[in-house]
Image (cartoon, grey):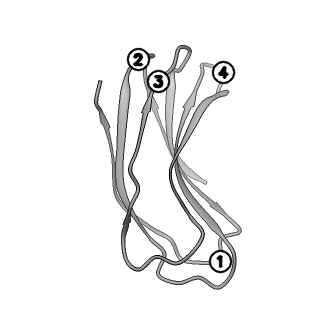
Amino acid sequence: MVYQDIPVRPGEAYSLDGRLNVPANTGSFRASVQLVVLNTWGGTLSTVTARSQTTATSGWVTTPGSVTIPNGGTTLRVQFKGEFLRSEVYLDALSLTRTR
């Protein structure tokens, strides 16, 4: 798993944009791009999966996602999670924008 944490406040809203490419695969796998809202102690309050990929893509595909920070949320984690990864997975142009 690869991630980046961003400090946030309840009521703020964020939008994620980016691209993912899986040119080929050699077995079962899952590659996910997620937005995870954490509380002060690191507990998960909510998870939004922007993209979950289990097959090869035919080029670049988008990874759109959005989240509004609930009460108690202090951290927004943007993460890439690879499970049973038997493939090359590329991420590009990930950007997080505060929309409110």
In which quadrant of the rendered image does the N terminus lie?
A: bottom right
Contact, mark 3 vs mark 2 (Cβ under 8 Å):
yes
Read off the residue under disc 3. Answer: 69
- Badge 4 is on which residue? 41
Image quadrant holding the C terminus, namely: top left
Lower position in the chain sequence, tag 3 or tag 4:
4
Q: Any mark on residue 86, and which? A: 1
Residue at image mark 2: 11
- The amino acid pointed to by label 1 is Arg
Nearest-to-viewer mark from 3 and 1:
3
The secondary element bearing badge 4 is classed as: loop
Q: Nearer the viewer, mark 4 or mark 1?
A: 1
Counting residues from the N terminus, which is met first, the one under dot 2 or under dot 1?
Answer: 2
Residues at marks 3 and 2, CA–CA distance in whole angstroms: 5 Å
Picture residue at 45% right of the left edge, 16% below the top:
10
Q: Under tag 3, what secondary structure? A: loop
Residue for point 56% across, 15% down: 72
Q: CA distance from mark 4 to mark 1?
A: 33 Å
> Of the residues shown, which amino acid type is indicated by label 2?
Gly
Corner quadrant of residue 43 = top right
Q: Is residue 79 above or below residue 67?
A: below
Mark 3 touching mark 4, by CB under 8 A?
A: no
Tell me residue 24's x, y (percent).
53, 84
Residues tagged 4 and 1 counted as in contact (Cβ below 8 A) = no
Q: How far is the residue under mark 3 from the one under mark 1?
A: 34 Å
Apparent side of residue 24 relative to residue 85 in the rendered image (left or right): left
Pointer 4: residues within 10 angstroms few (<14), some, or many (20+)? Answer: few
